[in-house]
Image (cartoon, rainbow, N blue to C red):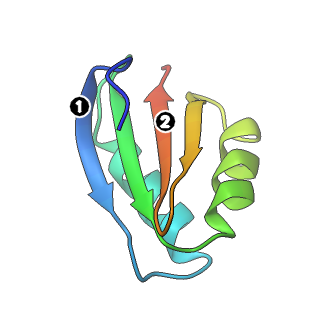
């Protein structure tokens, strides 16, 4: 995992397939304060493009980073407003 981010909360959506990783990420990010970072752990390869697309089209969130591991895709999403 990355130590570059001060992770506020971790959301485990492993085993969930589209669109649930994005739906659950949106719900979790709504509960965070501005500037806080949500770490999302997913096993769905489609979550890489799904979360990136959702973040780029959604005001108030920023996709900070994504990492592709052996079986887990990790996303870091910051709430910006």
Q: Residue at x 74, y 37 (%)?
A: 56
Q: Quadrant of the N terminus?
A: top left
Tell which of 46 and 3 is nearer to you: 3
Q: Where in the figure is residue 27, as x and y percent of width and height? A: 39, 56
**Res 34 → quadrant:** top left
Q: Where in the figure is residue 67, as x and y percent of width and height? A: 55, 44
Q: Is residue 17 above or below residue 23?
A: below
Q: Where in the figure is residue 38, as x and y percent of width and height? A: 36, 39
Q: Where in the figure is residue 11, as x and y percent of width and height? A: 30, 56
Q: Which mark is residue 8?
A: 1
- Which residue in the rendered view is the most extreme toward the front? 70
Tell which of 55 and 30 is nearer to you: 55
Sort mark 1 into few (<14), some (14-19) or many (20+) by Cα contacts within 10 Å: few
Tell which of 12 and 33 is nearer to you: 12
Q: Is residue 44 left or right of residue 76?
A: right
What SS does tag 2 mark? strand
Q: Is residue 68 left or right of residue 25?
A: right
Q: Is residue 58 left or right of residue 26?
A: right
**Res 29 → quadrant:** top left
Which is nearer the N-term, disc 2 or disc 1? Answer: 1
Residue corresponding to mark 2: 77
Sort mark 2 into few (<14), some (14-19) or many (20+) by Cα contacts within 10 Å: many
Q: Residue at x 64, y 70 (%)?
A: 45
**Res 61 → quadrant:** top right
The total of numbered circles placed on residues is: 2
- The residues tagged by marks 2 and 1 sit, at their Cα atoms, a distance apart of 10 Å
Q: Residue at x 38, y 69 (%)?
A: 13
What SS does tag 1 mark? strand
Q: Is residue 24 above or below residue 19?
A: above
Q: Residue at x 50, y 20 (%)?
A: 80
Tell which of 26 and 4 is nearer to you: 4
């Amino acid at each position: 995992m990355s130590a570059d981010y001060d992770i506020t909360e971790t959301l485990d959506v492993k085993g969930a397939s589209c669109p649930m990783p994005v739906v659950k990420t949106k719900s979790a990010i709504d509960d965070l304060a501005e500037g806080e970072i949500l770490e999302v752990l997913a096993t769905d390869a489609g979550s890489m493009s799904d979360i990136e697309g959702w973040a780029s089209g959604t005001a108030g969130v920023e996709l900070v980073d994504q990492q592709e591991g052996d079986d887990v895709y990790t996303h870091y999403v910051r709430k910006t407003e």
